[in-house]
Image (cartoon, rainbow, N blue to C red):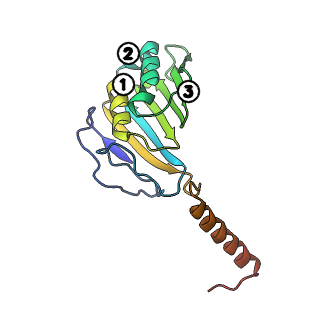
Amino acid sequence: MHTSASPNGSRRLRRLEADRLNVHSAPANGASAPKAAVGFGPHLVFDGFGCPRERLEDLTALYRLLDGLPDRIRMTKIMPPYVFRHGLPEDPAGGLSGFVLIAESHISLHTFPGRGYVNADVFSCETFDVEDALAALREAFAPARVEWKLLDRGREFPKHIAASRAIVNRDRRQVKLRLGLEASR
């Protein structure tokens, strides 16, 4: 997990770091997320704390963010964004939720003005510009503190036939070993 106290993200993670759950943070200094050799795709998980209430209540601004973010990170929007108000304004659990479907997957956001908090997910089957996504979220919500992770989703989702064969052969061998149909080497 990457934490930044700076709203503009002046500190940048220079290398991949694994945490206890074997989740990797992305370098925030490149045009795209690290490309997994086999996996389905990157999933950016963003949490913003200490956001100004007015930024979290602005339905039009959230719509514009979701409308423009796919182009900014070089993804393909396939429908207009949907943004909804949920709960009552005085309810700390109330706020805005929105999403936009992209050909590569989706982008979703949830705001909690009473708590000064926003969370976002950017999930894609293709690499995307993580630094630009983080910058757009920081610009939109002006958080005092940010935490984010970049997950490598579907590590065993094969994109290549050779990789598929290797995974299937490995799985078959493990099953045979468990059933006692093959001796271990």
Which mark is on residue 118?
Answer: none
Q: Residues within 10 Å of mark 3 (few under 14, many from 20)?
A: some
User: Could you tell whether 12 is left or right of 84 in the image?
Assistant: left
Marks 3/2 in contact by CB < 8 Å: the verdict is no
Q: CA distance from mark 2 to mark 1?
A: 9 Å
Name above or below for residue 84 compared with residue 148: above
Q: Position of residue 3 (x, y in %)?
A: 33, 43
Q: Residue at x 38, y 18 (%)?
A: 55
Image vertical order of residue 70 relative to residue 16, above or below: above
Give the labeled residue for mark 3. 78
Q: Give how far across and how far down residue 48 sits, in percent.
A: 39, 32
Foreground mark, 2 or 1, reads 1
CA gap, disc 1 and disc 3: 25 Å
Residue 96's place in the image compared with 184, above or below, is above
Identified by mark 2, the residue type is: Glu
Q: Is residue 125 left or right of residue 180?
A: left
Work out whether mark 3 precedes mark 2 in sequence or the reverse, and give the earlier one: 2
Q: Nearer the viewer, residue 6 or 16?
A: 16
Q: Which residue is mark 2?
A: 54
Q: Which residue is mark 1?
A: 141
Q: Position of residue 113 (x, y in %)?
A: 43, 21
Name the amino acid, label 1.
Phe
